[in-house]
Amino acid sequence: MKKITVSLLAVIMIMSFCACGKNTEANKPSEQSSIISNSDSTSQKNELIYNSTEAFDYIEVEGGITIIEFKNYDRIEYSKVIIPSEIAGKKVVGIGSLEEYNYWVFADFSRPCEVVVPETVSYIGVRTFYHAKNLVKVSGGENCQIIGDFAFADCDDLEEVTFLNNVDVVSENAFSDCEKFLVAN
């Protein structure tokens, strides 16, 4: 009887160890969001595509909403973050605030990362990408008209913002201390 009990406990322990690494419903992305993993021979790339409020905090503004925080609490290493054009049925018209300095929407990235701005965005606010280490490229944003104070300041690795030719107002200090960007442009 003792041998049977010990054997049964051993089988249960082995099964529980095997189950530990499996993905459960609790830690899967929601149906409204997706993480796309592309593997190649040199590295693994993760792209984040969200069309829900899970990844972003936002506030309502005239004409839609503005994103005020990217919630990457797990510090997942993304190579690309794609901002949705709509959240909770409302158009995303801005990222950050043009008046307030307390919304640092994107902080450091753990590896080189591109952020894709939707065409619905008309402004990138004050300090939106301030001190965002490893931010290398910002693309999309064809209808962005205003880039606020210190929006990209101190982004050491920033090399390219693809939509600058379309922007009407770029704050004088929007790209301060962005050595790679200033040299390239």
Image (cartoon, rainbow, N blue to C red):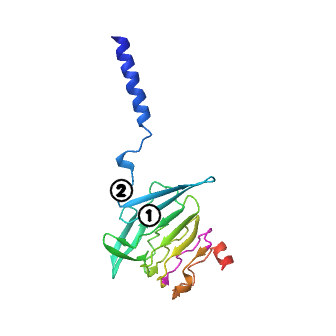
Q: CA distance from mark 1 to mark 2?
A: 11 Å
The residue at which mark 2 appears reads as 30
**Mark 1 secondary-structure assignment:** strand
Indicate the amino acid at tag 1: Ile
List x then y, in percent, for residue 152: 55, 74
Q: Is residue 151 magenta?
A: yes
- Compared with residue 44, is residue 2 higher up or lower down, i.e. above or below? above
Determine the residue located farthest toward the bottom in the rendered image: 168
Give the extent of the magenta segment: 146-159
Which callout, 1 or 2, points at the residue further toward the start of the chain? 2
- Residue type (three-letter) at the residue carrying disc 2: Ser
Residue 89 vertical position relative to residue 49 in the rendered view, above or below:
below
Residue 165 quadrant: bottom right
Q: Is residue 38 above or below residue 149?
A: above
**Residue 49: mark in rendering:** 1
Q: Residue at x 57, y 74 (%)?
A: 153
